[in-house]
């Protein structure tokens, strides 16, 4: 497409740098500085999409981020492969560059011919609350018709189906003043705030070029020079100041507590030859001393029949396309307005060569100097007129207007032929960020707008976003907000407007489609219906009709909707309320929010020193807390069951080697260490000799089991505490809490040593033979080194804390060596172990082995409601100690009740059947539903050593019920099991009788 | 995101902290001598004020120390932070509002 509507000169485009994009498969031409919207307009095309519900043809409404209609799917770098397309980009903010592939949305088979447009004829059906009223019955329609057919017919773009191939980055920044918006107010504020060089200033603007509304302005001057020259000078001044950072293409989208402000910078979408790997977007998290909001205002559309026809635009947007992009939105322009500012559009459009006339809702006596200016320029102005309807379908072809009689009656109608309409219903200050900061809005009836009222955070608003519209006043307001006193002179603007909600008409209101919310296809009729059906609060009307709930958050529609509701209810506008503005101000990509935290960086993986060996030796891994642990080591052809059966047998017949490095480890040191342990654990510690180990049980203050683990006393004042793998951080926090807040008098230090020690467990009858050749300064004999003791010495010449402990019931050692030596020691022991049939085993075999001998796992058998006695571990609870954490709670009446759920074993009638962990247990499977549950399965495995399946369960009063039959749920129904003792395997030979 | 003024480190973002519930509830000296009801009340009963609330906070991803804070439950504003063991500061409602 060529550019028949492009002016030969002027505008902020670079005619020496032509470019083209692919639009719906066709070539679309433009210049550097264009957006997709300005290229379309230069080519003479307004049709840019189909609407959400009715599939009505839609054009370009706006020139900025408030665009509700012209939404595009953009493949940013189709030449670099998939994963670079995203939907719902506003044509008005997509910067044109070579290589973009853009497509319009929500139509089939094409933009020009859309079958879905039949919805427009069915619109009497699709009234406000259509989903609520329709998607109820018959029930079988829920997933057959409503979801797949009706909901699918409504929609925006298509979500990407492949992972995002782009890179996104993020950064944090601090500044003294953050200025949001680089229009006249923001620039003046940034200049003033940075003038003395003492304050760090960040100036962020969502546009590709700073200047704000001045970019559209070819007539105003600031400081005696044309406005855009002042902008350039101001930017040069700011650039020269080392305390200023200016960020174009940076949208401030979220304003959070304590001036924590989030912004997204579009880094590379506009760069044709951006290097591979350059971030696409960058998320900024700024902590600002003060924030100056200079976010401008949004123009209100007029609400009249067919006000959504392509070619009907906001007045300031027409001006913008003419002046900034040198692209005429048509030949014949009608300016329909209730606002003075639209006269500037008329004057500029006329000067650019368009045929222009003005239809003003206001009476001549209510107009300001703009009226004379228009007359002087030879523009025909019809004051006191209303717009009845727009003509044309895929492009506006005329406007039916009529004089409003003194009594409000509609006079004789005239049809004005046109191919473009510039409409303005006045202005709405952009208070989104102020509202997000939790500031209170105040309604100003003079300006017909909600303005920033009471601030909650250190921020202030300047310029149009607080209802200051005159350019000279805006510049002065900005300078003041930045802490300055003087401001440059500036040209006066045409300001003031008369609020109108729905334009007066004599048409049948029940047949007229006059759009309030363009993106969600909400008409004035829908809002009236909602009010008639009893919705009075704007929050309810909004949800019922979906007005203001589209991706544009109602930037152009909210005030018209509010005013309409207030008008129907005959209440003052503030009484209807205003909706809450929430982040993000404009849609933000998930990529920007996630940044680098995806794929392998999504969640950090902790690896043990032996992880590399395990990977090389074919381990299958599983995540345990943040750790990745070897689950089993399959040999060729083995599945998990076969591998685990082999590994568990090897431990009981020869010897197994196991990486226990993930065990939480805390060193408790200090003169009062034993006393501290005494108070934290249920066991007695004062009498534990140096070199001794004890299985410790830790409760919360409420008496329930919190953690467990073997504790070794290395010295009079030093304990080596182990915790469960997942429990290490919370156990340390629990200990620190008591130490710091309840017993600050105790002289104890707590240090996490989890990552300092690699732990290699050797378990099985031949464990000693494997270890013996490498140990120095430790006598491994049973007499010198009995079960549950600890010795320090050397293994393979490496300093070592050697524990004689067992989590399998077999003879066992846990070799603690400094983490850096872990892999070398493991390899040495494994090599030696070959003589004794050593078998590496993983967490799955570890679980089976411990269950065979009835050892619990905290978090598996326990769920935060289990006492030591419930587990049959009351022997670990000191009767002598007057107090420890949780002791008093153990004496509460419900904690000693006889029918508490207790740990028992379950043996299925069919020894081959393995129960589901978590399965519910009942006494009588034929009882009526809801059945009485008497317990649940906590652990369940196929045990090769026992030659059958085994399970542990928590059963009401279970210990008294051994031998009884119960029934357990399975996916196929109930299965029979017998309650047993929770010890299933008797260790032969040298045992760990802990 | 809130900034919380750790008495030991200064202002830090809230993600570094962990709230530990209501402050100034000392663990009883001799729990074993307490009646069930009194112990239950120590364990489970907490105030839930609208307005200023004294809370325990842990600077877990910082100095690792516990401290107390006065937080306004309506505005989420931290009005004061103070070391563990110090009495609750007197804050006038006017200060609390700011």
Image (cartoon, coloured by chain):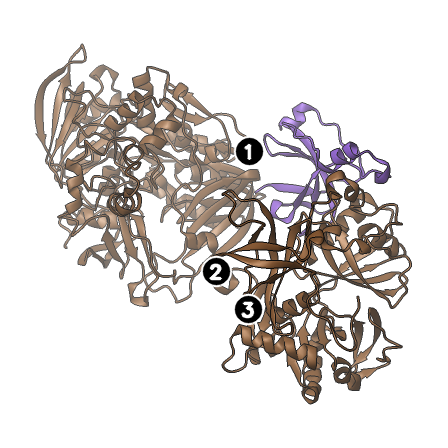
Chain colours: A brown, B purple
Picture quadrant of residue A650: bottom right
**Of A931 and A745, the residue lying toward us:** A931
Q: Determine if residue A45 is in view.
A: no
Task: Identify the subunit bearing mark 3.
Answer: A
**Residue A693 x %, y %:** 83, 65
Which comes before the other along the chain, label 1 or label 3? 1
Mark toward the viewer: 3 or 2: 3
Picture quadrant of residue A67: top left
Q: Is residue A133 left or right of residue B87?
A: left
Residue wearing tag 1? A457
Q: Determine if residue A142 is in view.
A: yes
Cβ atoms at labels 2 and 1 below 8 Å apart: no
**Residue A23 x %, y %:** 21, 55
Q: Is residue A612 left or right of residue A701?
A: left
Q: Residue at x 33, y 42 (%)?
A: A65
Q: Is residue A422 left or right of residue A736?
A: left
Q: Residue furthest bottom?
A: A835
- For residue A429, which numbered disc appears in the image? none
Mark toward the viewer: 2 or 1: 2
Task: Identify the subunit bearing mark 2.
Answer: A
**Of A190 and A488, the residue lying toward us:** A190
Q: Is residue A260 left or right of residue A466?
A: right
Q: Is residue B42 above or below residue A532?
A: below
Q: Residue at x 83, y 62 (%)?
A: A719
- For residue A598, which numbered disc appears in the image? 2
Residue wearing tag 3? A912
CA neighbours of label 2 inside 10 A, class few (<14), some (14 to 19), many (20+): few
């Amino acid at each position: 497409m060529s550019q028949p509507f492009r002016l030969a000169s002027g505008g902020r485009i670079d005619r020496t740098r032509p470019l083209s994009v692919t639009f719906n498969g066709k070539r679309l031409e433009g210049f550097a500085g264009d957006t997709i919207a300005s290229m379309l307009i230069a080519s003479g095309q307004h049709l840019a999409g189909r609407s959400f519900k009715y599939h009505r043809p839609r054009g370009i409404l706006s020139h900025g981020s408030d665009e509700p209609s012209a939404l595009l799917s953009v493949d940013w770098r189709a030449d670099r492969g998939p994963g670079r397309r995203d939907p719902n980009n506003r044509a008005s903010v997509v910067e044109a560059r070579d290589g973009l592939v853009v497509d319009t949305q929500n139509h089939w088979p094409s933009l020009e011919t859309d079958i879905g447009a039949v919805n427009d004829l069915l619109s009497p059906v699709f009234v406000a609350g259509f989903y609520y009223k329709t998607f109820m019955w018959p029930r079988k329609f829920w997933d057959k018709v409503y979801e797949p057919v009706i909901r699918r017919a409504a929609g925006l773009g298509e979500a990407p189906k492949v992972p995002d191939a782009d890179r996104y980055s993020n950064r944090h920044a601090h500044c003294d003043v953050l200025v949001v918006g680089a229009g006249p107010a923001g620039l003046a504020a940034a200049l003033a705030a940075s003038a003395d060089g003492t304050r760090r200033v960040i100036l962020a603007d969502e546009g590709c070029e700073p200047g704000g509304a001045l970019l559209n302005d070819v007539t105003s001057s600031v400081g005696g020079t044309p406005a855009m020259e002042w902008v350039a000078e101001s930017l040069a001044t700011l650039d020269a100041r080392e305390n200023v950072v200016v960020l174009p293409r940076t949208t401030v989208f979220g304003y959070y507590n304590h001036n924590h402000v989030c912004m997204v910078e579009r880094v590379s979408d506009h760069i044709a030859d951006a290097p591979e790997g350059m971030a696409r977007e960058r998320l900024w998290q700024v902590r600002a001393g003060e924030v100056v909001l200079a976010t401008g205002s949004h123009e209100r559309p007029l609400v009249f029949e067919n006000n959504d026809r392509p070619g009907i635009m906001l007045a300031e947007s027409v001006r913008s396309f003419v002046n900034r992009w040198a692209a005429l939105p048509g030949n014949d322009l009608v300016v329909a307005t209730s606002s003075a500012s639209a006269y500037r559009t008329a004057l500029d459009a006329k000067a650019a060569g368009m045929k222009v006339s003005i239809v003003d809702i206001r009476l001549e006596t209510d107009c300001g100097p703009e009226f004379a200016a228009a007359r002087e320029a030879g523009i025909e102005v019809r004051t006191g007129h209303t717009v009845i309807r727009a003509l044309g379908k895929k492009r506006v072809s005329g406007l039916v207007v009529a004089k409003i009689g003194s009594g409000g009656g509609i006079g004789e109608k005239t049809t004005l032929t046109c191919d473009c309409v510039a409409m303005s219903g006045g202005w709405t200050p952009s208070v989104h960020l102020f509202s997000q900061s939790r500031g209170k809005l105040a309604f100003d009836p003079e300006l017909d707008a909600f303005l920033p009222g009471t601030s909650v955070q250190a921020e202030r608003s300047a310029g149009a976003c607080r209802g200051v519209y005159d350019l000279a006043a805006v510049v002065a307001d900005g300078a003041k907000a930045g802490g300055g006193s003087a401001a440059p002179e500036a040209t006066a603007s045409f300001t003031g407007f008369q609020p109108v909600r729905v334009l007066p008409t004599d048409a049948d209101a029940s047949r007229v489609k006059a759009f309030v919310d363009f993106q969600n296809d909400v008409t004035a009729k829908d809002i009236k219906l909602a009010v008639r059906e009893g919705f009075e609060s704007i929050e309810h009307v909004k949800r019922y009709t979906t007005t203001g709930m589209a991706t544009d958050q109602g930037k152009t529609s909210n005030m018209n909707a509010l005013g309409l509701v207030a008008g129907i209810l005959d209440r003052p506008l503030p009484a209807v309320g205003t909706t809450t503005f929430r982040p993000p101000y404009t849609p933000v990509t998930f990529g920007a929010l996630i940044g680098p935290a995806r794929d392998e960086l999504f969640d950090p993986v902790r690896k043990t020193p032996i992880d590399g060996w395990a990977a090389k030796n074919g381990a299958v891994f599983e995540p345990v807390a943040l750790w990745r642990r070897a689950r089993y080591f399959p040999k060729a052809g083995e599945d998990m069951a076969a591998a685990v059966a082999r590994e568990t047998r090897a431990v009981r017949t020869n010897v197994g080697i196991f990486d226990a490095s993930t065990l939480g480890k805390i060193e408790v040191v200090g003169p009062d260490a034993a006393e501290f342990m005494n108070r934290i654990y249920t066991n007695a510690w004062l009498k534990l000799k140096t070199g001794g180990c004890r299985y410790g049980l830790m409760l919360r203050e409420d008496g329930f089991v919190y953690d467990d683990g073997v504790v070794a006393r290395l010295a009079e004042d030093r304990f080596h505490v182990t915790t469960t793998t997942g429990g290490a951080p919370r156990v340390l926090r629990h200990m620190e809490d008591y130490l710091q807040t309840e017993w600050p008098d105790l002289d104890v230090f707590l240090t996490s040593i989890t990552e300092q020690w690699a732990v290699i467990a050797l378990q099985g009858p031949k464990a000693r033979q494997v270890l013996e050749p490498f140990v120095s300064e430790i006598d491994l004999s049973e007499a010198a080194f009995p079960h549950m003791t600890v010795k320090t010495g050397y293994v393979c010449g490496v300093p070592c804390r050697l524990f004689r402990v067992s989590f399998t019931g077999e003879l066992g050692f846990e070799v603690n060596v400094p983490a850096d030596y872990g892999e070398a020691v493991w390899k040495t022991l494994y090599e030696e172990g070959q003589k004794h049939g050593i078998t590496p085993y993983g967490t799955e075999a570890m679980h089976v082995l411990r269950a065979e001998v009835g050892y619990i796992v905290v978090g598996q058998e326990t769920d935060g409601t289990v006492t030591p006695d419930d587990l049959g571990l009351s022997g670990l609870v000191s009767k002598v100690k007057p107090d420890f954490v949780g002791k008093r709670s153990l004496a509460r009446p419900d904690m000693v009740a006889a029918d508490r759920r207790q740990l028992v074993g379950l043996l299925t009638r069919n020894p081959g059947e393995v129960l589901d962990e978590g399965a519910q247990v009942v006494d009588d499977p034929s009882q009526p539903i809801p059945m009485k549950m008497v317990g649940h399965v906590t652990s369940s495995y196929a045990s090769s050593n026992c030659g059958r399946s085994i399970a542990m369960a928590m059963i009401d009063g279970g210990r008294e019920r051994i031998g009884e039959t119960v029934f357990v749920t399975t996916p196929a129904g109930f299965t029979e099991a017998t309650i047993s003792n929770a010890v299933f395997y008797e260790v032969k030979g040298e045992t760990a009788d802990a | 995101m809130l900034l919380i003024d750790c008495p030991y480190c200064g202002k830090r973002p809230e993600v570094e902290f962990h709230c530990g519930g209501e402050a100034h509830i000392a663990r009883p000296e001799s729990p074993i001598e307490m009646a069930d009801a009194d112990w239950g009340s120590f364990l489970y009963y907490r105030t839930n004020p609208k307005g200023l609330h004294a809370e325990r906070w842990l600077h877990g991803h910082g100095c690792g120390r516990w401290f107390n804070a006065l937080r306004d439950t309506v505005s989420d504003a931290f009005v004061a932070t103070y070391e563990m063991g110090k009495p609750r500061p007197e804050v006038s409602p006017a200060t609390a509002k700011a």
